[in-house]
Image: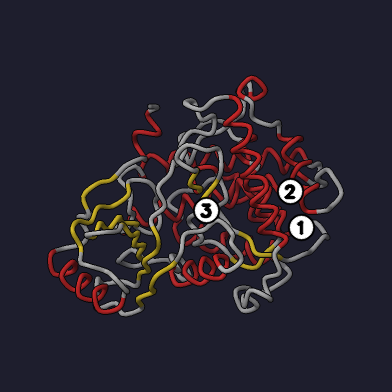
């Protein structure tokens, strides 16, 4: 097992839930969750830096609880109620997400709102090159990753009751504004490349507006793969989902091919012999997505999308840094992630320069 897989897999003590929290939670679930027979144990999943996520073991079934973290938080961040809404809607059309059980907006139970969902038994890969898989498995898992994102972007969000889930149109302008503000709120030192991107991005948005459901953080380590088959059975972490531009979502997924391994997420494929690994090239992955979406192959103005996504990821990590400062970060490994902010900004600005604009 790799160091990254070891660091982010498995469980740890649920230290931010005290005995009184657990007593209230147990009573709440027994009174509202059908066939719930009490909490035998509760542990926190090690992975993730955003919304703390817990495994609840009951007498005859396991559940997952995902809560908003306590403390002072950025406005609109950590919206677990939105996660619950999108997962519940997608499950109705048999999209691979866990089944939701209950949303609790009563903060008196454990201090913040939370929801409970199905526990899916499977594999989460924290290394983009999946060292313990065969060539065939890697190829099929990446193909399924591609397929599910194309399916998501082709769904009619209005027919799913999600017409109020976001504002259609003008997605990039709104996102650039949002992440610029949140970056400034959490900023601890000047990074010149971030300053340049904040100025450059709004002036260079492509003129190809469209709207779909977007996941917002679609990558290998946010999916659960079947225990023995190369098939995705659950897509997780919908905190950043909204109605947005599908190419913003898809090109974020492409960062795996563009990013060197700087210690975040599932690492990067940049510089690796992906053909030997059985992983599709970036161009092959783009062509498969376009074919499944029913759109023309290729990706125009790719430099903008890359610059935007590296900027956005740097801003997200800066938010984690701000939460460390404020004492609300949920993962002990979060401090190491902030070292990636400046390199991400540098790579993003490099793509902006490459565009020639």
Labels 1, 3: front one: 3
For residue 189, side relative to residue 144 (left or right): left
Contact between marks 1 and 2 (CB within 8 A): the answer is: yes
SS of the residue at dot 3?
Answer: strand
| Disc 1 to disc 2, C-alpha distance | 7 Å
Q: What residue is drawn where x is 67% and y is 55%?
A: 199
Q: CA distance from mark 3 to mark 2?
A: 27 Å
Q: Which residue is mark 1?
A: 205
Query: Distance between the Cα atoms at labels 1 and 3?
Result: 29 Å
Where residue 353 appears, x then y in whole percent?
74, 40
Q: Which residue is nearer to you in this view: 283 or 205?
A: 283
Picture quarter with the N terminus: top left
Q: Is residue 305 above or below residue 327?
A: above
Crowding at mark 1 (Cα within 10 Å: few <14, some 14-19, many 20+): some
Instruction: In this rendered view, identify the residue nearer to me: 340 or 143.
Output: 143
Q: Is residue 303 left or right of residue 262?
A: right
Residue tagged by mark 3? 235
Point out the tag, 1 or 2, that comes first from the N-terminus. 1
């Amino acid at each position: 097992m790799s160091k990254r897989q070891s660091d982010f897999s498995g469980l740890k003590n649920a230290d931010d839930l005290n005995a009184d929290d657990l007593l209230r939670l147990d009573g709440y679930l027994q009174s509202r969750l059908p066939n719930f027979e009490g909490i035998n144990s509760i542990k926190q999943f090690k992975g993730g830096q955003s919304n703390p996520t817990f495994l609840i073991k009951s007498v005859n079934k396991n559940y997952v609880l995902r809560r908003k973290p306590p403390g002072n938080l950025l406005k609109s961040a950590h919206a677990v109620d939105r996660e619950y809404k999108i997962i519940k809607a997608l499950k109705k059309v048999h999209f691979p997400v866990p089944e939701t059980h209950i949303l609790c907006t009563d903060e008196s139970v454990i201090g913040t709102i939370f929801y409970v969902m199905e526990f899916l038994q499977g594999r989460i890969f924290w290394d983009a090159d999946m060292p313990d898989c065969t060539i065939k498995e890697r190829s099929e898992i990446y193909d399924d990753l591609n397929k599910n994102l194309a399916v998501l972007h082709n769904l009619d969000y209005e027919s799913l009751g999600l017409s109020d889930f976001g504002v259609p149109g003008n997605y990039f302008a709104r996102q650039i504004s949002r992440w610029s503000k949140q970056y400034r709120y959490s900023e601890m030192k000047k990074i010149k490349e971030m300053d340049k991107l904040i100025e450059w991005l709004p002036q260079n948005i492509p003129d190809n507006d469209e709207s779909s459901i977007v996941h917002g953080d679609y990558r290998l380590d946010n999916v659960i793969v079947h225990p023995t088959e190369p098939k995705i059975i659950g897509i997780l972490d919908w905190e950043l989902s909204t109605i947005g531009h599908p190419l913003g979502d898809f090109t974020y997924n492409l960062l795996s091919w563009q990013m060197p391994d700087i210690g975040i997420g599932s690492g990067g494929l940049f510089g690796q012999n992906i053909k030997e690994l059985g992983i599709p090239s970036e161009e092959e992955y783009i062509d498969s997505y376009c074919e499944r979406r029913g759109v023309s192959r290729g990706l125009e103005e790719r430099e903008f999308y890359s610059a935007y996504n590296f900027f956005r990821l740097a801003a997200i990590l800066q938010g984690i840094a701000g939460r460390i400062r404020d004492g609300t970060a949920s993962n002990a490994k979060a401090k190491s992630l902030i070292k990636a902010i400046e390199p991400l900004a540098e790579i993003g600005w490099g793509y902006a320069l490459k565009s020639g604009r």
